[in-house]
Image (tube, helix red, strand yellow):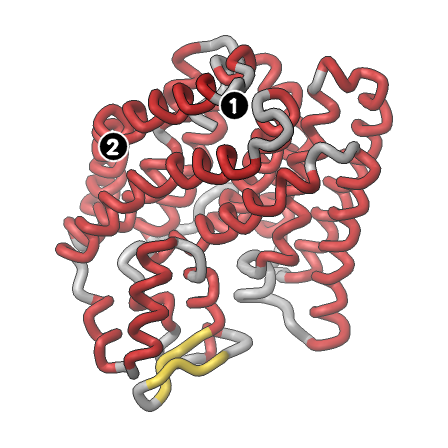
Amino acid sequence: MGTLRILLALCVAYGHLTKLPSFPSSDVAVQSFFVISGFYMALVLNEKYGPGSYWLFISNRVLRLWPAYAVVLILSLAVADNWRSIFALNWFDVAFFIGSQILIVGQDLYLFLFVSDGTLAFTAHYTEASTPLYTLAPIPQAWTLGLEIYFYLLAPFLVRRGPLFIAAMVAASLALRMLLQGAFGLSGEPWSFRFFPSEFALFMAGSLGYYVYAPKHRAQRTLAKTLLSVAALLLFLALAINRWDGMWRLASLSVLGLVIVSTPNLFSATKDIPWDKYLGELSYPIYVCHFLCGWMLMPSTLAVAYAALLLSVAMSIALYHLIDRPIDNWRQARLRRNGGTMAVGRLLPSV
């Protein structure tokens, strides 16, 4: 599983730094991360966090994301200059921008806002706006972290309720996606993979995969397998309809479908492999720091873009050893003190 995660992170970084098509496409790689996140959160909430542990779970999730993010944010603010024009806006918009940068949540709204006459205005399609707010973000890809946090806030109430309930959540999210497109014409960017209620189906499909894997839910495994296969097919069709750009899109979505159905078996096969786990640990720092490496080198040629990609890997190793691993040791100690189960925790990549 760790190898898959780092490959997906490199895929996203490659697409952003080189401006060349990646396979799978960057958006599908991000959506694959959502699926994997759904699987891991269902796993830890069912087997690692007991009743009454909601705030421990949420605080541990924040500690997983925020420290490395904060370091990259500080460095990005020092290196990049795109964000400085935000101070030309009114005080309320400046406060929103600063607050969302610090808290992470709210950055997904950047895809629905643009700068107009010294203030922020709504846009249904940011590609048609002259100055979308996301172009001023020092960590442009951090909008996905906001979606992750929204899922974390909901997951404890949802992922313990069995495969039928989770499958119903997948269906509801997909129905909303198609309603937005069919009734209101809201498809393509940013609706095709940046709107949380629509992306929610991907997280829940990953959570459904947990019931295929989990030994203690063996009685539900056949039902969960069937529902997971149906969910993968429906997601493939809905995402293809939601944004169509040729056969390359179908090929990328085939990878997403494969991730959905294979995650349970892949985790089972790789959970005891130390080097695979280590590679997985590098996926988040690569994801969060690669734009910073781009700001630092300002790639003007393909060779410089590849250098930025290598720098991202090197920086991710430093972030993991200096920031993520010490914080993770503290997170796990907090869980032990509160009676959490560590048998699963030893197998998991800092979740």
Q: Element under label 2?
A: helix
Give percent across and percent down for residue 283. 39, 33
Q: Element under label 1?
A: loop
State whether residue 341 is above or below residue 7.
above
For marks 2 and 1, give the CA distance: 20 Å
Residue at 44 percent across and 82 percent down: it is: 121
**For the view shown, which residue lies furthest in the bottom direction?**
117
Position of 116 with respect to 323 (left or right) is: right
Give percent across and percent down for residue 223. 86, 28
Q: Could you tell which of marks 2 and 1 lies nearer the N-terminus?
A: 1
Residue at 77 percent across and 59 percent down: it is: 175
Three-letter code, disc 1: Met
Three-letter code, disc 2: Leu
For disc 2, the neighbor class at 10 Å (few under 14, some 14 to 19, many from 20) is: many
State whether residue 351 is above or below residue 197.
above
Position of 265 with respect to 106 (left or right) is: right
Position of 176 with respect to 340 (left or right) is: right
Q: Do we see residue 10 in this rendering?
A: no
Give percent across and percent down for residue 27. 51, 51
Q: Toward the viewer: 115 or 148?
A: 148
Position of 307 with respect to 48 (left or right) is: left
Residue at 73 percent across and 26 percent down: it is: 211
For disc 1, the marked residue is 1
Q: Toward the viewer: 77 or 155?
A: 155
Q: Do we see residue 140 in this rendering?
A: yes
Instruction: Report which quarter residue 268 is drawn in.
Output: top right
Give percent across and percent down for residue 261. 69, 30
For disc 2, the marked residue is 319
State whether residue 89 is above or below residue 67.
below
Which one is in front in this view, the residue at disc 2 or the one at disc 1? 2
